[in-house]
Image (cartoon, rainbow, N blue to C red):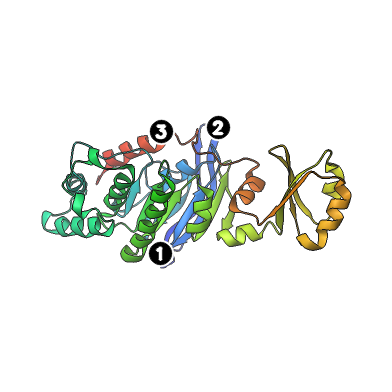
């Protein structure tokens, strides 16, 4: 594989098997500098396994990848030095201050005292925590702790920051502020971000590009806008005494037809032109809503499942990964 200078992450054919089970198959993508890239998928899709390979926690069965030009197999130590990871589960020491948490992390990465003091000050200022730097972390709110974890991941100037559910469990206002900080860090630090999230509305608004995984494979890749446009129409929600599903599926302008919340969701092309014929085919209806499609509609069409806020595949595995990553450290 030839590494392109603008691509901070390049993966080609990454595959991971656990005995007869193929967790990830032919994982291939390229992510450019300063992109915010979302990796989405339902339970068991293989997201964590893919990220664990990219961060050298797991060795791939086959395929290869480069992070900032370093091969994940030949240059594993260099890869670990140029990535930062923020895990879903809390990993801060609450009996230390914010500053002490960052200082501990700096020492683990072998940063010199003369260098990391100023760096800590800069990062705390970036996320508006300088006034609380010397307070115990146990006195921080959930949003403040998340911001501290974000800057801790940036402390050693990583080329890539991996974020697992960066806003999970936060209230809407704090979620919005967290995203503001992520955008600011990308702009000021020039960092590339690869994240997972179950908030599809956030992914739609905040990610530059998105890959959707299912059953270990990437099944869609593109900007949120292009993925949504691929549905080719508006979404109707219809409640009717009887819905002639088989007849609807034969109509050439019907892109999707599925049961939803006591009614039906129908994706229709050229809505206002074809709506009269659709209603004529259905007959009497008791309720009708029309809306623009969302990333959730794309996700549901491609995977046949709704994304969930807690993944059976991922629960606990990121914490285990954190421990393994820290144990490997700078070896």
Q: Alpha carbon of mark 1 to alpha carbon of mark 3: how far? A: 30 Å
Which badge, 1 or 3, is on the more N-terminal residue? 1
Position of residue 21 in the picture relative to residue 322 (left or right):
right
The dot on residue 318 is none
In this view, the mark in front (1 or 3): 3
Under circle 2, the secondary element is loop
Whether residues under marks 2 and 1 lie with C-beta atoms below 8 angstroms apart, the answer is no
Residue position for label 3: 316
- Percent of width and height locating residue 2: 45, 63
Q: Disc 2 or disc 3, which is closer to the eye?
A: 3
Residue 137 visible (yes or no) = yes
Judged left or right of residue 158, residue 305 is right
- Residue ID for mark 1: 33
Classify 10 Å Cα crowding around label 3: few (below 14), some (14-19), many (20 and above). few
Secondary structure state at the residue bearing disc 1: loop
Q: Nearer the viewer, mark 2 or mark 1?
A: 1
Marks 2/3: CA–CA distance: 23 Å
Say which mark, if any, is on residue 20.
Answer: 2
Lower position in the chain sequence, tag 2 or tag 3:
2
Q: Residue at x 20, y 55 (%)?
A: 120
On the image, the x and y values in percent for residue 206 come to: 47, 58
Given residues 166 and 220, the one toward you in this image is 166
Does 201 sit left or right of 122 as displayed? right
Q: Residue furthest front?
A: 286
């Amino acid at each position: 594989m030839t590494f392109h200078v603008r691509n901070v992450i390049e993966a080609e054919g990454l595959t991971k098997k656990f005995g007869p089970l193929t967790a990830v198959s032919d994982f291939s993508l390229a992510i450019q500098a300063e992109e915010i890239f979302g990796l989405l998928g339902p339970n068991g899709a293989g997201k964590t396994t893919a990220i664990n390979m990219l961060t050298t926690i797991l060795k791939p069965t086959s395929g290869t990848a480069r992070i900032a030009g370093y091969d994940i197999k030949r240059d594993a130590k260099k890869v670990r030095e140029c990535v930062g990871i923020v895990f879903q589960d809390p990993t801060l020491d609450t009996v230390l201050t914010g500053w002490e948490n960052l200082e501990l992390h700096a020492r683990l990465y072998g940063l010199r005292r003369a260098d990391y003091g100023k760096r800590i000050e800069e990062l705390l200022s970036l996320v508006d925590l300088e006034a609380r730097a010397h307070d115990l972390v146990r006195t921080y709110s959930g949003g403040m702790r998340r911001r501290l974890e974000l800057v801790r991941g940036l402390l050693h100037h990583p080329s890539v920051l991996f974020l697992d559910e960066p806003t999970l469990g936060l209230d809407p206002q704090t979620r919005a502020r967290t995203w503001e900080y992520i955008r600011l860090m990308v702009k000021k630090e020039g960092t590339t971000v690869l994240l997972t999230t179950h908030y599809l509305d956030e992914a739609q608004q905040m990610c530059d590009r998105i890959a959707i995984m299912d059953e270990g494979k990437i099944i869609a890749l593109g900007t949120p806008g292009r993925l949504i446009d691929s549905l080719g129409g508006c979404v109707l929600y219809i409640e009717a005494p009887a819905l002639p599903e088989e007849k609807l599926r034969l109509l050439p302008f019907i892109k999707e037809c599925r049961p939803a919340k006591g009614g039906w969701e129908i994706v229709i092309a050229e809505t206002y032109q074809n709506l009269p014929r659709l209603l004529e085919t259905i007959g009497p209806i008791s309720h009708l809503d029309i809306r623009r499609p969302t990333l959730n509609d794309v996700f549901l069409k491609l995977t046949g499942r709704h994304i969930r806020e807690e993944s059976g595949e991922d629960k606990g595995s990121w914490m285990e990964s954190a421990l393994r990553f820290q144990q490997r450290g700078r070896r």
